[in-house]
Structure formats: structure tokens, C-alpha cells
Amino acid sequence: MHRHQRAARAPKSASTAPRPAPANKLTAQEEALILETLNSERFIDQAPEQIYATLLSEGTYLGSGSAMYRLLRREKQVAERRRQARHPARKVPELVAYQPGEVFTWDITKLAGPAKGTYFDAYVMIDIYSRYIVGC
């Protein structure tokens, strides 16, 4: 209750007022030049930070590394930039048993021992069809 009363008495903040554009905002031409450079054949497989460092060492400044990331994010290009092979999803093999003793599976479980820091490994062999333990 007290929190709501204080909030009602507190002056309203000016956060709803429109903010002015920053003085150093990139123009549309500068953004296009940066995107063209990032997507050029020379830099297509490099991260924006690497491109930024390379261009700075050559004496060229197009924008900050964060500006490059921001432009790529806006264009939905922030991902792995290298060309990668696309492998089709493999089907997980499924084992089916039609009678007991056809297919077995195994499991290892750690069991706490009598003292702290000691463990026992319980090895179990299970028949898939009947779900009985056939070996330990």
C-alpha cells in the first residue's frame, strides 16, 4: 500500500518524451557502405571485429565494431559467416525385439559407497523385450 501511495505522489519521469537522434548517427550511405564491405568477397568469412581491426590497420575507419554488429543484427546476418556444409539430419537407429533374448541393452549407474568420496559402479544388462535384468 505504501509503495503505491509513494508512486502516486512521485513526479512522472520524462522517459516517454521522444529522444533526439545522436549527433554521430550513421547515415544511410554509410550504413550501405559498411554492409557492402562486410558482405564483400574479401571479408565474407570473417567476424566483424576482425574486419574492423583489418580496416583500421589499413587506415580506413567505417564505423565501430559494435556498429557493424548492430547493422548485421538488423539485417538478420548475425550468424556463422563461413560457408559450411549442411548435413542432412540422420535418423536415430531404432532397435525392435520380437521375443526375449533378441536385443540387450546396458546401463552403468554410480552408487554412493560407505564413506564420502567412494562410489560403486553398478553395471546392468537388460533385455529390451521383457525389460528384465539378465546380467550384472
Image (spheres, grey):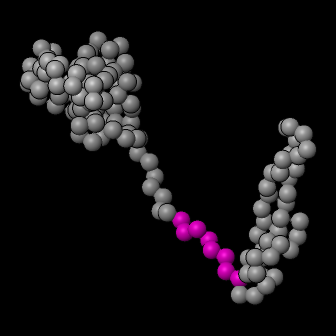
**Quarter of the picture holding the N terminus:** top left
Image quadrant assignment for residue 100: bottom right
Q: Hey, which quadrant is residue 61 in on the image?
A: top left
Q: Nearer the viewer, residue 2 or 108?
A: 2
Majority SS type along the magenta span:
loop
Q: Which region shows up in magenta?
A: 90-97
Q: Residue at x 17, y 19 (%)?
A: 10
Asked whether 6 or 70 is in front, the reply is 6
Question: How far across and how far down the image is residue 33, in percent?
Answer: 18, 28
Foreground of the two, 20 or 2: 2
Residue 31 spot, x, y in % from top left: 17, 28
Q: Decide if residue 27 is in sight here.
A: no
Above or below residue 134? Residue 21 is: above
Relative placement, left or right, of 93 versus 48 is: right
Is any part of residue 99 visible from this angle?
yes
Q: How many marks?
A: 0
Task: Reply yes or no: does residue 119 show up in magenta.
Answer: no
Could you tell whether 116 is left or right of 67 in the image? right
Residue 101 coordinates in the image, percent (x, y): 81, 82
Q: Is residue 113 above or below residue 135?
A: above
